[in-house]
Image (spheres, rainbow, N blue to C red):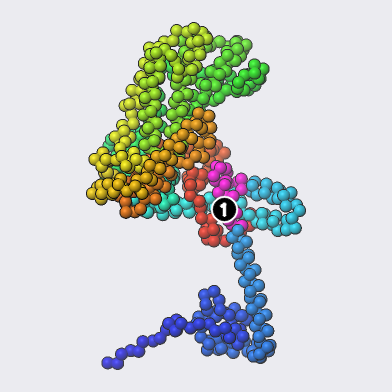
Amino acid sequence: MATKKKQRKTEDENREFKVEWTETFAFIQNLNGLPTCLICQEKLAHNKKSNLERHFTTKHVSFSTKYPVGDARKKAVEELRKSQETSSSVFNYSMQSSNNVNIASFVVSQEIAKRGKPYTDGEYIKSCFVNASEELFRDFENKADILKKIKELPLSAKTVKDRIVKMSSNITDQQVEDLKLVSALSIAVDESCDINDTVHISLFVRFISPTGPKEELLGLLPLKGQTRGEDIANAVIECIEKHHIPLDKIVSISTDGAKSMTGVRNGFVAILKEKINHEILTYHCIIHQEALCVQTFPEEICKVMELVINIINSIIAKALNYRQFKEFLVEMESEYEDLLLHNKVRWVRWLSRGNVLKRFASLLTEIKAFLLEKGVHYPELTNDQWIQKFYFMVDVTSHLNQLNHKLQGKGNTIFSMLEEVTSFENKLSLFAQDFERETLIHFPSLLKHRQENNSDIDICYFKTTLLNMREAFLNRFQEFRNSKATLAFVRKPLNATVTELDFSPFNIDIGNFEMQLLDLKNKELWSSKFERLCADIEILEKNKCELSSQHKWSALKDLEKEDMLIFNTWNSIPDSYNQLKKLAFAVLSLFGSTYLFEQSFSSMNLIKSKVRGRLIDENLESCLKLKTTTYKPDLPKLSKEMQGHCSH
C-alpha cells in the first residue's frame, strides 16, 4: 500500500520578506513580518513572491502602467511609504493621547475614592482644573491644547463610579494572585452597621507577599437578615471560595470576642474550624481585651466621667452659651480656648476619655467660674472626694492612653503588643505601690491637688482599684501568653527551643526544622543577621519612645515598621532554611488586633454618609477597598482595556 506523501506547509518554509519587493510590487513588511500593500493596504498571508506579483498585476494595473519599473516607480513608492508612515504616526499619537486621558481619569477617580468623596466631585475637580489652568498656563503657546485635553477628561459621576469599580476589581485580582502563592494566611472578622442599619462583615486577610507583610480588605460582606455565627461563617466562606483560596491556608482567626463570633457550638470561629483540616489559632483582639480590663473601674469613678461629659454638653448645647464660654476663656487667658468632645468610636474611646479629662482638668477653675456666673451649680465640683476621683481618672487615663498609642497602628507584631501589655501589668503594681508609699509620683494631678488643698487621699480605695485592674489584665490575653515562645521566634530564633514551639497550625516538618535551626545557630553569617535585627528594633523603639514623650503621634507613623524589619531579615536568609522561614512568615502573618477594622468602619461611615445613603453595597465595597489598600491598581492595563470617551 502506497504511503500518502506529507503535504508541505508554507509556514514551514521560513520565507522572508525581500527588500526589493517594495520597489517592484509596492509592498512593505508589517509588524507581524507579513507583506502589506502600500496602495490598497491589503495584507497577504505569506511572504511568497508569486502572491505579491499576482496581487500587483491584477489589482493595480493602472499604477503599473503609470509608473513603470525604474525611477518613476521608485519615486511613487517612496511617496506611498511616507504617506503610510504619517498616517501610522497620527493614529499612534491619537491612540496614545486617548490612553493618557483615560489614565488621568483613573488617577482622579482613585483620589476621590481614597478621600471618601462622592462620585459627583469628578466634575467639580474638572471645573476647578479648567479654571485654574486658564491662569496657570496663560503664557503658554499651547494653552488651547492643554485646556482641550483637560476638558476631554471623562469625569462624570457614572464614569468615576465605573473607574472605581474597575480599579477595585484589579486590586482584588492582585490580592488573590498573591494569596494563592502563600503557604499561610490569617483572617480577621468584625461587623458594623452603615447609615441604613445594614450589617456589614469586614473580612481582612494578613499574609506575607513577595514585598512584605500585607493587611488587606478582601471583602465587605452585607448581611440582610440575621447575624448569627452561622450567617457570618457562610458569608466569609463564600467570599474565600469565590476567589478560589483554599481554606486550609488559614492558620489563625482574630475577632472582637462577640458571642456570635466565639460561641462554642454555633459561633463563627467554631463553624469555620470544622471546615479546616488542621488546628488553627484563635485570638481575641488585644485592644478589645484591654478596653474590657479598664471596665473594672468602680461605678462611682465611672460616674465621674459621666458628669464631666454632662457638664461639657451643657456648656456647648446652646450656641450663645458656647460662644460666651469661649470668649470667657480668652478673657481669662486660659491655656486652652475650647473643650474637647468625647468620641465613642470603639478603638479611640478610652483614648478620647483621657484627652477629655485632661483638658477638663486644665480648665476646671474657668469652668467653675463660668458656671457660677450662669447660676448653674454642680455640688460635685466642690466635693473633695469627687475631685480626688476626678484627678485619679485624669492620671490613670493618661497612662492608659500611652498603652493605647503603642497598641494601635500598622506594623506591630503580636509579640511586641504582648510585651506592652505585660509591661503595663507590672506598671499597675508599681502604681499600687506608689499609693502604698503615699508618694503619688505617678499621679501628678492628684499629687498637686493634695499639696494645694491639704487633702486626705483615700489611699486604700485607689490602691484596690489599681490592683483589681491588674487582676483583670492577668486573667486576659491567655491565648497570646500560651503562644509566647512561638510568637517570639520571628525576632529571636537563636533563643528558640523546639520543644517550646507550637507547630500544629503551620504544617512544619519538625525533623528538618530542628536540623535547620541548629545549622542557623552555628553559622555566624546568618545568625549575625538576627543580632543586627535586635539592634535595629532597639533603635526603632528608642525613636518611638522619644516621639511618644513629645506627643508627636503623626511622626510615629513615618517610622519604619517593625514587621517590615523582621520580614527583610528573614527574606535575606537562603531558602535552604525553608522550614524556619515557613514558620517565621506564618507567625508574622498573625493578626494581633482588629485596629484596622475600626479604621475601616470609620471610613465606611464617611463614604456612606447621610447624603450618600443610596450607595449600593458593591460600590461601597469598591470605595472602601481603594481607601484601605496598599496595592496600586494597574492603570495602563485598565486603560488599554477600554476606549476613551469625552465626559458627558
Observer-nearest of 383 and 322:
383
- Classify residue 367 as left or right of residue 494: right
Observer-nearest of 153 and 536:
536
Amino acid of disc 1? Phe
Q: For residue 117: magenta? A: yes
**Residue 135 percent coordinates (x, y):** 74, 49
For residue 88, which quarter of the picture?
A: bottom right
Local packing at callout 1 (Cα closer than 10 Å; few below 14, some 14-19, many 20+) is: many
Q: Which residues are magenta?
A: 101-122
- Classify residue 630 as left or right of residue 144: left
Q: Look at 27% across and 46% down and name the residue there.
A: 518
- Classify residue 534 as left or right of residue 507: right
Q: Look at 68% across and 88% down and name the residue there.
A: 71
Q: Tell me the quarter of the image containing the C terminus.
A: bottom right
| Res 462 seen here | no
Q: Secondary structure at mark 1?
A: helix
Observer-nearest of 310 and 521:
521
**Residue 404 percent coordinates (x, y):** 45, 30
Q: Residue furthest front?
A: 524
**Residue 600 percent coordinates (x, y):** 47, 39
User: In this rendering, is residue 213 above or below 337?
Assistant: below
Q: Look at 63% across and 74% down and name the residue there.
A: 85
Observer-nearest of 154 and 175:
175
- Which residue is tagged 1? 106
